[in-house]
């Protein structure tokens, strides 16, 4: 059973997850739940009474600035190991990066995207993706990407990407990825960027001294998601020729 806590006033994220949990109960007999609270007192009561696998917090409800607030939570409740996911409308990757550096595990945009919300919940609640609950699907790709060094994007979806590297990185590494695959063609971009966190690193099957790293996107806004979906459509059409 996976459990979540939502601290905020917006109903949409909880409604999306409740519907998904109902589907999972019917199809797989699994029981998952998310609790929603709207003020700090009820938030504290929920933490005192239950353990949660993931905690979502709206930027607008924290009594102090979100970054100060999450640092205070981690300092005063050191035994609380749940990942904290910030929810809001920020679109600037630099500002989102500062939120993540301050102690937030991830960032979810409002209005929420149902498929990505489910993927995010599962990623943070159980620590990885599961094929039987996957909501978005990847396409094979061969597109260069720049991290600190250059890699090759082998698979891409709206949720994550798989990059072939000739150097090793660590799970949980956070970085900005640059690639034509993230570029908004309508805006005249030749290269786009997206903040991402590594969630898995494996040896490359074809080259023992190389690696395949998988990253999920952190705080990718509507414009960046549109760019990624456009890249996926172009790859799909090209593969049909």
Image (tube, rainbow, N blue to C red):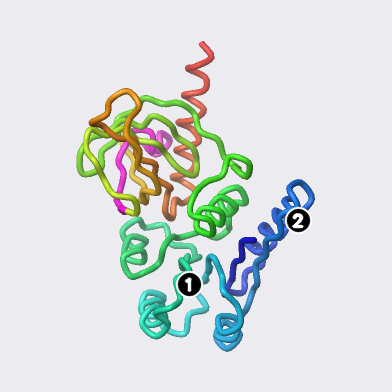
Q: Nearer the viewer, residue 46 or 241?
A: 46
Asked if residue 5 is among those painted magenta in the image, a careful observer would answer: no
Tell me the residue at 48%/80% (across/down): 62
Tell me the residue at 42%/82% (across/down): 77
* Image location (x, y in percent) of residue 191: 31, 37
Asked if residue 184 is among those painted magenta in the image, a careful observer would answer: yes
For numbered disc 2, what is the local secondary structure?
helix
For numbered disc 1, what is the local secondary structure?
helix
Magenta range is 173-188
Above or below, comparing residue 158 to residue 18 in the picture: above
Q: Nearer the viewer, residue 133 or 87?
A: 133
Which quadrant would the N terminus be assigned to in this image? bottom right
* Image location (x, y in percent) of residue 26: 79, 50
**Left or right relative to 6: residue 102:** left
- The residue carrying pointer 2 sits among few (fewer than 14), some (14 to 19) or many (20 or more) residues within 10 Å by Cα, namely some
Q: Nearer the viewer, residue 145 or 162?
A: 162
**Left or right relative to 132: residue 177:** left
Q: Nearer the viewer, mark 1 or mark 2?
A: 2
- Residue 22 has which mark? 2
Q: Looking at the rendering, which quadrant does residue 72 occupy?
A: bottom left
**Left or right relative to 146: residue 22:** right
- Residue 176 has which mark? none
* Image location (x, y in percent) of residue 140: 45, 26
The span from disc 1 to disc 2 (Cα, nearest Å) is 28 Å
Q: Residue furthest top?
A: 241
| Pointer 1 or 2: first along the chain | 2
Q: Looking at the rendering, which quadrant does residue 6 occupy?
A: bottom right
- The residue carrying pointer 1 sits among few (fewer than 14), some (14 to 19) or many (20 or more) residues within 10 Å by Cα, namely some
Q: Which residue is mark 1?
A: 59
Q: Nearer the viewer, residue 8 or 27?
A: 27
* Image location (x, y in percent) of residue 218: 42, 54
């Amino acid at each position: 059973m996976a459990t979540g806590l939502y601290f905020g006033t917006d109903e949409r994220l909880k409604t999306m997850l409740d519907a998904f949990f109902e589907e999972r109960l019917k199809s797989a007999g699994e029981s998952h739940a998310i609790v929603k609270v709207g003020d700090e007192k009820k938030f504290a009561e929920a933490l005192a009474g239950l353990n949660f696998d993931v905690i979502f917090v709206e930027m607008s409800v924290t009594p102090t600035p979100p970054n100060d607030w999450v640092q205070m939570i981690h300092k005063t409740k050191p035994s609380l190991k749940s990942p904290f996911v910030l929810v809001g409308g920020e679109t600037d990757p630099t500002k989102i990066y500062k939120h993540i550096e301050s102690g937030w595990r991830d960032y979810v945009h409002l209005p929420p995207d149902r498929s990505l919300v489910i993927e995010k919940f599962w990623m943070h609640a159980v620590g990885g993706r599961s094929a039987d609950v996957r909501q978005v699907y990847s396409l094979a790709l061969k597109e260069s990407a720049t991290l600190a060094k250059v890699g090759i994007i082998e698979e891409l979806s709206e949720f994550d990407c798989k990059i072939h590297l000739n150097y090793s990185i660590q799970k949980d590494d956070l970085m900005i990825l640059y690639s034509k695959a993230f570029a908004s063609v309508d805006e005249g971009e030749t290269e786009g960027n997206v903040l991402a966190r590594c969630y898995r690193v494996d040896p490359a099957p074809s080259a023992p001294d190389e690696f395949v790293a998988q990253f999920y996107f952190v705080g990718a806004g509507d414009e960046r998601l549109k760019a990624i979906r456009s890249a996926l459509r172009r790859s799909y059409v090209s593969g049909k020729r």
